[in-house]
Image (cartoon, rainbow, N blue to C red):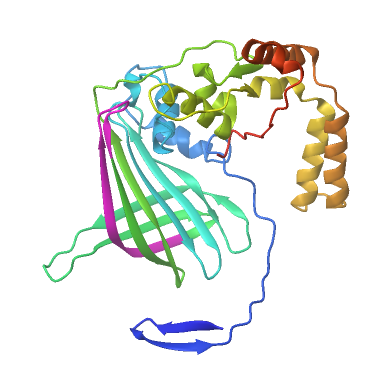
Amino acid sequence: MLKEVAENNKDVEESIFVKFNLIWAASSDVYDCTLDTNPEGFAEVMAKSLWELLVVPPIKKFKDALKISMLKLENLGKSRSMVGCKFNTILGNAPTNGFTFHLSTVSAPYAFNNLPFGFVIGSDGVMATLKNLDIATKKPCTAEKNENTITANFLAGEQYELKGKVLDTIVLNSSQGWSGRLEFSFIEFEVKDQKGYGLILTGCEHDNLEYHFIYFTVVPFTVKFTNELSQLREVSGGKGSSLGKLTQLSKDNDFIVPKGIVVTTAAYNEFLTQNILDAVKYLENVAYGNESGDLKEACNTVSSIVEKTPLPPQIRRSIIEDLMSIFKKEANFAKFAVRSSATGAN
């Protein structure tokens, strides 16, 4: 039993019986803005921009600006190419049919203007890459109206038109670590007669950048939590980098972080064999219906190959050396908790 409330009169409630019929399908791959994108569109906006150097395309500015727009400022070094970058991002979902999208445009001086990237996931779980995007917001013209409006026209598999209103807004101005402005706004919208909810994120990077940059040339197979290198998600994943950052913070705060090490992404790459890669690729093809096969058997095959693949001696040696360095002789009989730490999630 659920309570039904009329949209035009929320004071009136009625208890009704609801039966749920759930239909699920495997969703598309995780979106990677460096792969699942529109290379022709990227090349076009860069070709039309005014480059600082006549014959050198602004590839570095392009990569740095994408990092800013994905809000990954914590691990970036000081880079003058990021000054003046601006971005707009809309995240939304229509709960009635699962329609989901991530739409972004980013601009960088002397590199490109309103570069679109992102994706749309339809009610069938299929992901379509964003090809173009036009976002416009409008403030109320009269005193009676206190809500800004937003419209967005975008192409991702098919053409969409979004219309909605902007609700509460949070503004963040920063001068520590990075210098810039972020605005977070809640929105209600309609797309193809479906109501949805989401967020708008807008931001810009100012001058006077002061980044704490971690220099490294080679990633070791293991790093201790006390090593600054462990704080990089690209090296340690989400949980590992969080433990590295907490270890750093614990030096000036009254809390304890357990001692430990991270087996890095370099070790992961060293461990991978062609048999593992082939088995995982086959599993993906079966999961998404590109090849016929039994999904459970494909999963068991991957697990079996991974379990039977020996850990390279150089990785074992690095693990032993770091643990002995931290725990001394106790490492020979101590028990350790082991957790996974993916680079794409916390």
Is 86 located above or below residue 3 in the figure?
above
Asked if residue 196 is positioned above or below residue 337 in the image, the reply reads: below
Q: Position of residue 319 (x, y in %)?
A: 70, 16
Report the front residue among 24 and 254.
254
In the displayed structure image, the side of residue 41 where residue 276 appears, left or right:
right
Q: Left or right: where does residue 156 sit relative to residue 211?
A: right
Query: Can residue 252 be seen in this snapshot?
Result: yes
Which quarter of the rendering shows the N terminus? Answer: bottom right
Residue pictured at 49% horizontal, 54% vertical: 101
Is 293 covered by the magenta stretch?
no
Q: Is residue 40 left or right of residue 113?
A: right
Q: Position of residue 27 (x, y in %)?
A: 65, 54
Q: Nearer the viewer, residue 310 or 72?
A: 310
**Residue 335: % across, % down:** 73, 27
Residue appearing at x 36%, y 28% in the figure: 111
- Please name the residue shown 47% across and 50% down the image: 102
Q: Is residue 166 magenta?
A: yes
Residue 114 in view: no
Please name the residue shown 48% across and 83% down the image: 3
Q: Which residues are magenta?
A: 160-181
